[in-house]
Amino acid sequence: MSLQFILTVTLNGLTLAALYFIVASGFSLIFGLMRTVNMAHGALYMVGAYIGFAVFDPIYGSAWYSYAWLIAIVAGIAAVAILGVVMQVVFLGWMQGQELRQALVTIGLSIIIADQLLANFGGSPFQFFAPDMLFGPVQVPGVGRYPVFRLFQVGLAVAVGVGLWLLLNKTRLGIMVRAGVDDRQMLAACGVNVPLVAATVFALGAALAGLGGVIGATAQPMALGVDARFLLISLVVVIVGGMGSIGGTALGAILIGLAEQWGQVFFPTYSVILTFVIMAAVLAIRPQGLMGRKIA
């Protein structure tokens, strides 16, 4: 293997990890911090992509085509955030602490959402077209010509990670969220509207899934059925990195992204096994995740 090949595969793994991080960071907020079992997170990813494309397609054929992709991102994020609030308020808010019931309800919701997307949009795959400034290749030292959009994914993931870290560690909302993880009853006794905080965090986590949907459908064609894949990836990333840890989610995404790409190089038929080997090893050695907090 040449150095260029090694660098290219590694960069592919990092760009894939960037997409995984964007989606899994939303799952980490909902599952890791709020302790809400949302098995419909993959379905939210699909909703963001499909709603975004429903807005993108007619605009792209008009004089406003240069803004179509940005408008699609806003539409996908907004639609999924609203859907997330509805899910939290109507279905999940009153089930706090009932993990099995939450899991069963959200599995049912994911099936309903997938069926409705199929009924309204059909089963044909689609793909977004990135703006001209993000389209085409660029010269990367040691790698050669590489797609600009993939590098943009990495930059976007870094921006999302920094933004979430600042939100959770430097804002009043972040303090309330972290306090609610330890003691929701005490937080409510201090006069904080806990249901409102939970709905806000759920909306943010869902919005990140919607953002990931549009970004993912720009990088590669979108079709029904990817919801299960991204739900599973989000679960693995959060388990490996540690529940509720943004840094851990980033580390888990990098490990899984690199494992997938290098696994396809060495044993493409069984590369998916490497992901679960990593998860099993982490659970055996450090059950709380690589950067998770140990619970007494």
Image: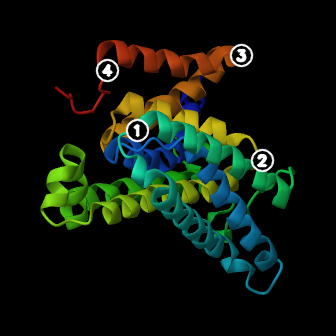
Report the amino acid beneath label 4: Pro
As drawn, which residue projects farthest toward the front?
A: 94
Q: Say what secondary structure mark 2 lies in.
A: loop
Q: Indicate which disc, 2 or 4, sits on the residue closer to the N terminus.
A: 2
Q: Say what secondary structure mark 1 lies in.
A: loop
Q: Name the residue located 37 percent from the left edge and 46 percent from the top edge.
A: 96
- 59 on left or right of 293: right
Report the amino acid beneath label 1: Gln
Report the amino acid beneath label 3: Thr
Q: Name the residue located 24 percent from the left edge and 46 percent from the top edge.
A: 181
Q: Say what secondary structure mark 4 lies in.
A: loop
Q: Name the residue located 74 percent from the left edge and 40 percent from the top edge.
A: 225
Q: Indicate which disc, 2 or 3, sits on the residue closer to the N terminus.
A: 2
Q: Which residue is mark 2?
A: 223
Q: Which residue is mark 1?
A: 98
Above or below — where is 179 with respect to 50? above
Of circles 1 and 3, the one toward us is 1
Q: Name the residue located 76 percent from the left edge and 55 percent from the top edge.
A: 117
Q: Quadrant of residue 76?
A: bottom right
Question: Where the N terminus falls, by quadrant?
Answer: top right
Of circles 1 and 2, the one toward us is 1
Q: Which residue is mark 3?
A: 269
- 270 on left or right of 57: left
Q: Which residue is mark 4?
A: 287
The span from disc 1 to disc 2 (Cα, nearest Å) is: 32 Å
Rendered location of residue 202, percent (x, y): 43, 57
Q: Indicate which disc, 1 or 4, sits on the residue closer to the N terminus.
A: 1
Q: Quadrant of residue 2?
A: top right
